[in-house]
């Protein structure tokens, strides 16, 4: 508050000076105008022997007293009908032609007389009997009295401000200090908080003006508390899930070491232990990869890297990568949807706006989940359906596995949730990753039974019939053709 006050003070001084000048001119201008009118009344006309009109001027004693002053120099000038000097000072400058007012109208102007600034009152007079001529009467006065009056006005206004300004600063300081005292107290209470204390701030103890800010901070604290709780739960589950394969690795390694120390060098026993070690390490590696995929899906920088992505190309490449694994389990893995080869370069395009790495991870997790739960001889199909109206792109992954009960279909998208009654190894993160990526890309997920019939009446290796299977349907917002360019965009 002090800075604007100090800035406004010189502006106030300048404005006061201008007002004081105007105030000081008015009374002295009235006095100068009275002198000019008195002198104008003394101009008369007489006729010569030839009949010509001649102006005359007589300065009475009273008029001389009016012109006399002890403070400023006063000059006057009276010119006749033909511009001849009748009385007064010849050096007094004449008014310009454009400054000539009508006869009898008194005007003021500023001029210079003997290097002194003067204020001039002048009037053009037409005496009685002078039909074709006018006389000029001018009275000038130096500006000493005016300057002194203006200075006195300035002193009368500015000097009190030297007292008022510090008092105003002190009052403002005191008022602001009292006003922000509750805010300072709130600041200290927040600073004294422990870093683990995310409880809401008491709004009743906060100033009314900052109540919306306190409510916003409380909302942020609540969301932060929920986020930290979710992360702690996730880390606890991750540690628990990693504990099992790591414990298996250690147990099998110790068992193999004891067998070697006992002199048992049977290849089959060592091979079995090594197989268990390989299986446990594979489970741990899969778990770590899934955790990294989950972290990548939640990364804000990954979310910001959006571009046109061809889902058909991603789907075909992912299916191609999983073909060897499907052949090991004798599973019919196939793709149905738009072609992505050269012959289809000008055909329909399943384009969405998204992150290609995340979308590839989504499809890989869906296919991996389907292959894990589909028994030998089953069917897994990746299908891409384009909306004829260009509104959505539909991605389906269906299998002929045991299916998911309706009561558990919402729970399977939670991290580390595993459907009961299945003997399939997994981390429980695949569908959680799918849900996170789909949410970031504005896609809707629908889970239902596939109801596929096994080929040639096959059943799984245990002799149990095939289950209803599962069909995951994701609807992505389609990218308008005008925003994609003439050619398909590579992921």
Image (tube, rainbow, N blue to C red):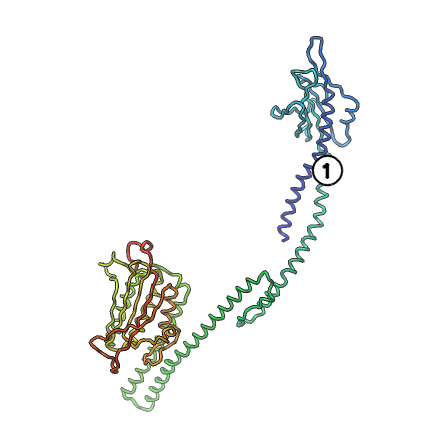
Q: Toward which corner of the image does residue 444 lie, by quadrant?
A: bottom left
In the rendered image, the residue lying farthest to the bottom is 262
Residue ID at (62%, 61%): 180
Residue ID at (37%, 83%): 250
Apparent side of residue 183 relative to residue 59 in the rendered image (left or right): left
Residue 22 drawn at (x, y percent): 68, 36
Apparent side of residue 138 relative to residue 315 in the rendered image (left or right): right
**Closest to the observer, 345 or 283:** 345
Tag 1 residue: 149
Q: Would you call the spot at circle 1 few (<14 residues within 10 Å), some (14-19), or many (20 or more)?
A: some
Residue ID at (65%, 42%): 15
Q: Toward which corner of the image does residue 37 lie, by quadrant?
A: top right
Residue 389 drawn at (x, y percent): 30, 58
Residue 280 drawn at (x, y percent): 34, 80
Do we see residue 336 in this rendering?
yes
Q: Toward which corner of the image does residue 486 lie, by quadrant?
A: bottom left
């Amino acid at each position: 508050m002090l800075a604007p006050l100090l800035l406004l003070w010189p502006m106030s001084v300048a404005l006061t000076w201008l007002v004081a000048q105007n105030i000081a001119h008015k009374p002295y201008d009235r006095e100068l105008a009275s002198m000019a009118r008195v002198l104008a009344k003394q101009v008369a006309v007489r006729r010569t022997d030839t009949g010509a009109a001649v102006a005359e001027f007589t300065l009475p004693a009273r008029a001389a007293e009016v012109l006399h002053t002890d403070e400023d120099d006063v000059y006057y000038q009276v010119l006749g009908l033909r511009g001849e000097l009748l009385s007064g000072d010849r050096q007094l400058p004449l008014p310009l032609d454009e400054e000539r007012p009508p006869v009898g109208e008194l005007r003021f102007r500023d001029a210079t007389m003997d290097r002194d600034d003067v204020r001039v009152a002048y009037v053009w007079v037409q005496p009685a009997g002078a039909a074709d001529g006018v006389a000029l009467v001018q009275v000038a006065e130096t500006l000493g009295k005016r300057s002194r009056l203006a200075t006195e006005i300035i002193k009368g206004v500015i000097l009190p401000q030297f007292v008022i300004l510090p008092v105003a600063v002190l009052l403002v300081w005191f008022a602001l200090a009292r006003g922000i005292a509750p805010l300072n107290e709130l600041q200290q209470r927040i600073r004294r908080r422990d870093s683990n204390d995310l409880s809401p701030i008491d709004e009743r103890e906060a100033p009314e003006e900052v109540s919306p800010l306190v409510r916003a901070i409380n909302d942020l604290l609540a969301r932060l508390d929920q986020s930290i709780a979710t992360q702690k739960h996730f880390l606890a589950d991750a540690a628990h899930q990693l504990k099992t394969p790591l414990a298996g690795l250690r147990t099998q390694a110790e068992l193999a070491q004891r067998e070697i120390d006992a002199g048992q060098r049977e290849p089959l026993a060592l091979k079995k232990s090594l197989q268990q070690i390989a299986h446990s390490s594979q489970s741990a590696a899969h778990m770590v990869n899934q955790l990294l995929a989950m972290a990548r899906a939640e990364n804000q920088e990954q979310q910001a890297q959006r571009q046109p992505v061809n889902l058909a190309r991603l789907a075909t490449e992912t299916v191609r990568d999983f073909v060897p694994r499907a052949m090991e389990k004798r599973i019919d893995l196939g793709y149905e949807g738009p072609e992505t080869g050269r012959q289809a370069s000008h055909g329909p395009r399943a384009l969405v706006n998204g992150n290609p790495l995340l979308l590839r991870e989504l499809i890989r997790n869906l296919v991996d989940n389907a292959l894990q739960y589909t028994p030998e001889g089953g069917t897994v199909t990746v299908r891409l359906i384009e909306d004829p109206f260009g509104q959505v792109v539909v991605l389906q992954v269906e299998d002929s596995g045991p299916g998911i009960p309706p009561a558990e279909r919402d729970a399977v998208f939670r991290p580390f949730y595993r459907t009961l009654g299945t003997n399939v190894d997994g981390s429980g993160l695949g569908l959680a990753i799918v849900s996170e990526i789909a949410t970031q890309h504005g896609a809707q997920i629908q889970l239902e039974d596939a109801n596929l019939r096994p080929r040639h009446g096959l059943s799984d290796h245990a002799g149990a019939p095939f289950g209803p299977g599962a069909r995951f349907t994701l609807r992505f917002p389609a990218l308008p053709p005008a925003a994609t360019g003439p050619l398909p965009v590579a992921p």
